[in-house]
Amino acid sequence: MVLEASEGTLELLRFGRAAFELFGEPMTLDLYWFQAYGGGLFLSFTDRTSGKLTYGGCRYLLDTVKGADLGSKDGKLVLDFNFSYQPSCAYDPRWVCPLAPPANRLNVEVLAGEKFA
């Protein structure tokens, strides 16, 4: 995935997929690695709250360069949607943010994490 911005491009390499269950249903989200910008693991997603209760572009679940990462437990990546948050571009249009790719669009409402008031 490549993000185009006025300052240039930001390349993210898809390197894995997280498989999990949510509401008893199997789901997956693609994991990305920042090639620049400090490197690090990155995961963004949309769900059925996007554009209604949350920013339409996505929410972030993992961004290790910013310290938003719960690590692993028993050799498995920890995904806790209670810690999902809106990107900077949700609050200020001067920010350019990587948004959720098509593979990371969940067809459920994730009523956890940061939402608009």
Image (spheres, rainbow, N blue to C red):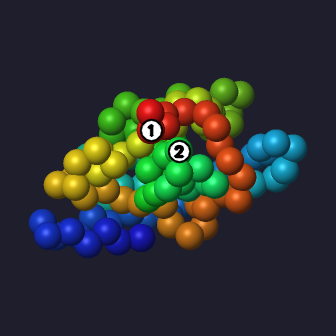
Would residue 63 be found to the left or right of residue 43 on screen?
left
Q: In which quadrant of the rendered view does residue 97 lie?
A: bottom left
Which residue is the site of mark 2? 53
Q: Helix or strand or loop: what does disc 1 sit on? A: loop
Let me know if residue 39 appears in the view: no
- The picture places residue 4, in percent across and down from the top left corner, at 26, 72
Let me know if residue 61 appears in the view: yes
Crowd tier of the residue under label 2, counting other residues whose Cα lies within 10 Å: few below 14, some 14–19, many 20 or above:
some
Would residue 108 be found to the left or right of residue 56 on screen?
right
Q: Helix or strand or loop: what does disc 2 sit on? A: loop
Would residue 35 be found to the left or right of residue 115 on screen?
left
Which residue type carries mark 1?
Answer: Phe
Rendered residue at 68%/47% (across/down) = 109
Q: Are marks 1 and 2 in contact (CB under 8 Å)?
A: yes
- The picture places residue 33, in percent across and down from the top left corner, at 42, 55
- The picture places residue 46, in percent across and down from the top left corner, at 56, 55
* Residue in the foreground of this view, choosing between 105 and 74: 105
The label number, if any, that marks residue 116 in the structure image: 1
Query: Which image quarter is the N terminus in?
Result: bottom left
When the figure is inspected, residue 66 is found, relative to residue 59, above or below; the finding is above
When the figure is inspected, residue 17 is found, relative to residue 116, above or below; the finding is below
Mark closest to the chain's N terminus, 1 or 2:
2
Rendered residue at 61%/54% (across/down) = 47
Rendered residue at 64%/54% (across/down) = 48
CA separation in Å, label 1 and label 2 = 6 Å
